[in-house]
Amino acid sequence: MKTIISFVLRHFPRPFLQRIGHWSARFLGIFHPGNAVECPVCDHQYGKFLPYGRKGRDNALCPNCLALERHRLMYLYLKRKTNFFTAPLKVLHVAPEYCFIDRFERMNNLDYITADIESPLAKVKMDIHAIPFPDNTFDVAFCNHVMEHVDDYVKATSELHRVLKPGGWAIIQSPQDLARATTYEDDSITDPQEREKHFWQNDHLRLFGRDYAQELAKGGFKVKEDRFVMDELTQEEVKRYALPAGELIYYCVK
């Protein structure tokens, strides 16, 4: 059954599930009854999460809200380590994740704006290299799994820095190879299969290394590499929420 579900989700990826609603994923969720895992985003419990990804990562996708490992981690981080759920905040969410949009829009403390250059989920059409908002507009910005795609990530991060208020903060996550000391780019690699081999996806322009915090700082941010999942969560929590156990949170402050 895992093989069948993995095949379905590889050929009907999340953008498709988002367009038709998540009823198809909910249907697949009936094959994983139980309460061994829990999604902190939507509070649903299953025996396991669904497999997902090009190689079918086991225990990855929440059938109810479509949250992946990194989304569940970010939600826990926001709840436990920030004022996101309590303070009045103006928020810019670039490339908004499906599992968050409706929840964040319903929060009375947020003035919540979604933006993207092409996503139909976003309310504002926007090139992150030229954000169409004045300086010092937002208290918080989210921009996850974007910097590996953009032409100029230093310009993109500097734009996020510009539109944040002094003291404002951003979470800017990207795929990262911690085995690499420095970020890897090579424009001469154009074959899609080779790009996937070198950069993990054929639409990635780079693969960030252990220097990711320094690269984000080039945009003007003071960057904290937060070892939240390693140092502050128990192994039982990591397992129950099916979190990416080695992922750092990049908390960026203006």
Image (cartoon, helix red, strand yellow):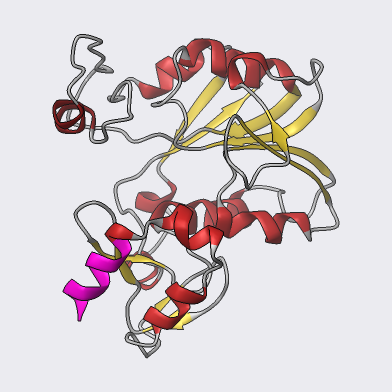
Relative horizontal placement of residue 5, taking residue 85 as reference (left or right): left
Q: Residue at x 22, y 20 (%)?
A: 181
For the residue pair 188 and 133, the one nearer the viewer reads as: 188
Question: Going 21% across and 18% down the picture, which residue do you hit?
Answer: 190
Q: Which residues are magenta?
A: 1-9
Does 220 lie within the magenta span?
Answer: no
- Left or right? Give the position of 78 relative to 48: right
Residue at 45% across, 21% down: 150
| Horizontal side of residue 111 vs 174, given as left or right | right
Image vertical order of residue 104 relative to residue 149, above or below:
below
Rendered location of residue 54, percent (x, y): 24, 51
Magenta segment, principal secondary structure?
Answer: helix
Determine whether 222 is above or below 3 in the image.
Answer: above
**Does 5 lie within the magenta span?**
yes
| Residue 124 percent location from the top left of the image | 73, 34
Q: Is residue 242 left or right of residue 167?
A: left
Q: Tell me where residue 14 sits by quadrant.
A: bottom left
Residue 46 vs 203, above or below: the answer is below
Q: Position of residue 226 (x, y in %)?
A: 45, 39
Q: Residue furthest bottom?
A: 34
